[in-house]
Image: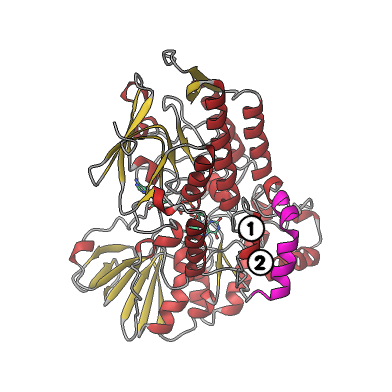
């Protein structure tokens, strides 16, 4: 067998996770192949090229910390960088660390089957290539499997269609067109103001009104960047032990324990910060107590009423179906103001659902609409979608998708019982989407690299969580989630946006710092909760 056919590790995906995992495994001396469905690096920042696509964690925090040289040489230009800027950064990383030669682009991994006798994975791609590898690291992304709305007849529509997460590389203009945007989650909220500026007429179809805070985006001054660069080591250390991956003092006061005027002033100060956690981080009980939550929600609704001229439109835009913070919070630049434009209309799909697409547009229960372009801002099959799309089979031909039928089961969100030597970066039941994901990605990647180094140093050929450790972790994550208001919302955090998907609160809510400590303790204890198989011995039954 040639080295090309057999490697130490296969990494699936070349976004923030895959690039850094490759870097770390190469440092360990492992032969590694990366397969990436796109024709370039970047993952999220490669695919999501829609107008307005932007990061909503501040650039100086949403970046790698593993290389002090990289930190010093890269200059972020805005508080919240645009998609092209983050993509430039990731291309720079790939080139600077000479990662590209190890990556096979435009190639999708379709299956990964564990061979218990050979103690390795057989990985197959849609280009017909097969590779065997001792380790497989799924860096497939928590938000990388886009979904369309479940409405019949999409193929009938004769105009242009675009999905925000599959935007082409060529510039897309909407000048003079009648355009529909379906979906008002984070991507919809980012793109609607820009499409409205171009389109002759824009109709926004909203199923769920979402809470959004003005981003207050601005260019970064040289002094601010220099100041951050000089304090990176301390900042990064604080990120790693923080709750969300962004250093911040956690609130201790309860919303209803302070006088109303003080509460409002606290919300005003939070609002002015322009962060996704602007309001939910004002008081300690917002995500736990419905009455406390309602004070923050009503503050946000009042802000919408203050901006939107038409009171009926303002009410339609005011979220009432879920507690604030329990769906992915959004940041915007001029979102609510957009609905004051004469060329922008809002349709409430809870009142008048879409029945079908037509040749010329779509039909709701109330009216027929003609469009030249339809934009789907309909999100993702989050956290499990990209993993379940691959035919992953572990010991005894166990299929991961079957194992996860009633919801994902993982140990620490990073490994699965029955699937030796398989790791999932920011997998389900880890902090993942509830955190600054670059911090969580670095932590997972480093943990995996250290685990592999440990195995090599001690002569182990396979590692796999025990069913007991996995069951305890699944229960722990569910119990933590149940303390919060998150499970009450129909959101992609709970799988509710995908018909038939098990309703499980998918991320771990214990905080980035606590989670890191748990993972470190597991490793320091000789990989507690895992079974390690010495090379040459049969795998555990
Ligand atoms: C529009 C948008 C904005 C976001 N903003 C933020 C933010 O502000 N802050 C934050 O913390 N997070 C944000 N996120 C989350 C973001 O996904 C992560 O921060 C991070 O980019 C994830 O990196 P990743 O490498 O883990 O996954 P991804 O970037 O999703 O990369 C996964 C890669 O795997 C590839 N892949 C998947 N399956 C296969 C397969 N079978 N074969 C081959 N290749 C495959 C995909 O093509 C993709 O390129 C945002 C997400 C979106 C969609």
Return the residue at label 2.
299
Q: Quadrant of the C terminus?
A: top left
- Asked if the magenta segment contains residue 223, the reply would be yes
The numbered mark at residue 519 is none
Q: Is residue 48 above or below residue 472?
A: below
Q: Give x and y (percent) for residue 170.
A: 33, 73
Front label number (2 vs 1): 1
Q: Which quadrant of the figure has residue 370?
A: bottom left
Start and end of the magenta stretch? 220-238
Q: Give x and y (percent) for residue 535.
A: 46, 18
Residue 44 visible? The answer is: yes
Q: Residue at x 30, y 70 (%)?
A: 366
- Asked if the magenta segment contains residue 82, the reply would be no
The span from disc 2 to disc 1 (Cα, nearest Å) is: 43 Å
Q: Residue at x 62, y 76 (%)?
A: 219
The numbered mark at residue 69 is 1
In-image side of 392 versus 193 (left or right)? left
């Amino acid at each position: 067998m040639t080295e090309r056919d057999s490697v130490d590790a296969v990494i699936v995906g070349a976004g923030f996770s895959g690039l850094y995992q490759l870097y770390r495994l190469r440092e360990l001396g492992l032969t590694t192949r990366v397969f990436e469905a796109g024709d370039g690096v970047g993952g999220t920042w490669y695919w999501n090229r829609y107008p307005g696509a932007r990061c909503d964690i501040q650039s100086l925090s949403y970046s790698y910390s593993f290389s002090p040289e990289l930190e010093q040489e890269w200059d972020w230009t805005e508080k919240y960088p645009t998609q092209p800027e983050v993509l430039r950064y990731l291309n720079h990383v790939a080139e600077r660390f000479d990662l590209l030669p190890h990556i096979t682009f435009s190639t999708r991994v379709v299956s990964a089957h564990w061979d218990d006798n050979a103690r390795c994975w057989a990985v197959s791609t849609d280009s017909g290539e097969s590779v065997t590898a001792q380790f497989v690291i799924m860096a497939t992304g928590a938000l990388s499997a886009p979904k369309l709305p479940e409405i019949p007849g999409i193929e009938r529509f004769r105009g242009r269609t675009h999905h925000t997460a599959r935007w082409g590389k060529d510039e897309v203009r909407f000048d003079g067109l009648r355009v529909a945007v379906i979906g008002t989650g984070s991507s919809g909220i980012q793109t609607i103001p820009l499409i409205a500026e171009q389109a002759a007429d824009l109709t926004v179809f909203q199923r769920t009104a979402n809470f959004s805070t003005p981003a207050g985006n601005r260019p970064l001054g040289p002094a601010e960047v220099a100041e951050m660069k000089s304090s990176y080591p301390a900042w990064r250390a604080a990120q790693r032990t923080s709750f969300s991956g962004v250093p911040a003092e956690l609130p201790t006061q309860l919303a209803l324990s302070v006088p109303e005027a003080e509460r409002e002033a606290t919300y005003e100060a939070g609002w002015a910060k322009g962060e996704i956690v602007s309001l939910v981080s004002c008081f300690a009980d917002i995500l736990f107590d419905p009455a406390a939550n309602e004070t923050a929600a009503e503050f946000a609704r009042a802000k919408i009423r203050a901006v939107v001229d038409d009171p009926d439109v303002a009410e339609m835009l005011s979220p009432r179906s879920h507690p604030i913070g329990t769906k992915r919070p959004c940041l915007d630049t001029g979102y609510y103001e957009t609905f004051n434009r004469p060329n922008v209309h809002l349709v409430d799909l809870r009142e008048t659902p879409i029945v079908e697409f037509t040749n010329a547009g779509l039909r709701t229960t109330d009216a027929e609409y003609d469009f030249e372009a339809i934009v789907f801002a309909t999100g993702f099959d989050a956290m499990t979608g990209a993993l379940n799309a691959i035919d992953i089979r572990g010991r005894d031909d166990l299929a991961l998708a079957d194992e996860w039928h009633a919801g994902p089961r993982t140990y620490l969100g990073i490994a699965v019982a029955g699937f030796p030597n398989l790791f999932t970066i920011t997998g389900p039941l880890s902090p993942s989407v509830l955190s600054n994901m670059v911090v969580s990605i670095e932590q997972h990647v480093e943990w995996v690299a250290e685990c592999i180094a440990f195995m090599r140093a001690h002569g182990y050929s396979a590692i796999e969580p025990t069913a007991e450790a996995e069951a305890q972790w699944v229960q722990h994550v569910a119990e933590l989630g149940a303390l919060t208001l998150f499970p009450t919302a129909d959101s992609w955090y709970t799988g509710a946006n995908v018909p038939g998907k098990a309703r499980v609160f998918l991320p771990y809510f214990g905080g980035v710092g606590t989670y890191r400590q748990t993972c470190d303790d597991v490793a320091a204890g000789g990989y507690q909760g895992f079974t390690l198989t010495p090379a040459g011995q049969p795998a555990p039954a």
